[in-house]
Image (cartoon, rainbow, N blue to C red):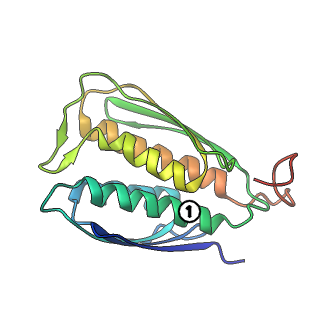
Amino acid sequence: MSRVGRIERVTKETSVLVEVGLDGTGRVEVATGVGFFDHMLAQLGKHGLFDLTVKTEGDLHIDSHHTIEDTALALGAAFRDALGDKSGIRRFGSASCPLDESLAQVTVDLSGRPYLVHSEPEGMASMIGPVYDTTMTRHILESFVAQAAICLHVHVPYGRNAHHIVEAQFKALARALREASELDPRATGVPSTKGVL
């Protein structure tokens, strides 16, 4: 069974290609034009053991918002596509990842119902590098959740450095998604009493 999702999304603002293989080795090829976002997507692929290709061209002459948002939407859609009917998956996953002084805790349910709970420490720096607005982290997760149709809880109880706070979230998200999307050798069919996810 091939669990690969591929999405091409083209608007007047961006052109996005995303391909994700759930049963990969963490091979990553990412180019969005937003360096810090590329770094975060690389964490997602590497620590989730997803083979991930992302190629985005966007209106960066305006700002990075459309580029990041549309990439996250396509990533969520590709992830959902790769899951197929979700037969045999574990469905639930959770992970905690520290990064120096920061800690991120992520829990996911591949439920078919989009819902996000997200919290970060107050007083975070507003920018990481010249083009990554730290308020985009929540928006990335919102966009991903909406298209992937998953329930996602992300909590950072403490942290000081904005880079560490955001990166810990992507690493924990990767590990939680990896656990939830893995095939369970003891399971058959869809892991729901409803018979569908």
Vertical side of 108 occupied by 80: above or below: below
Residue 85 visible in the current orientation: yes
User: Which image quadrant for residue 127?
Assistant: top left
Residue at left 19%, top 34%?
126
> x, y percentage for residue 109?
65, 44
> x, y percentage for residue 107?
58, 38
| Count of marks placed on residues | 1
Residue 42 visible in the current orientation: no
> x, y percentage for residue 136?
31, 44
Q: Residue furthest front?
A: 12
Quadrant the N terminus occupies? bottom right
Q: Residue furthest bottom?
A: 2
The answer to whether residue 133 is left or right of residue 2 is left
Q: Mark 1 packing: few (<14 Cα in 10 Å), some, or many (20+)?
A: many
The answer to whether residue 140 is left or right of residue 192 is left
Residue at left 85%, top 56%?
186
Residue occupied by mark 1: 79
The amino acid sitting under disc 1 is Phe
Residue nearest the viewer, comparing 157 with 85 = 85
> x, y percentage for residue 128?
19, 43
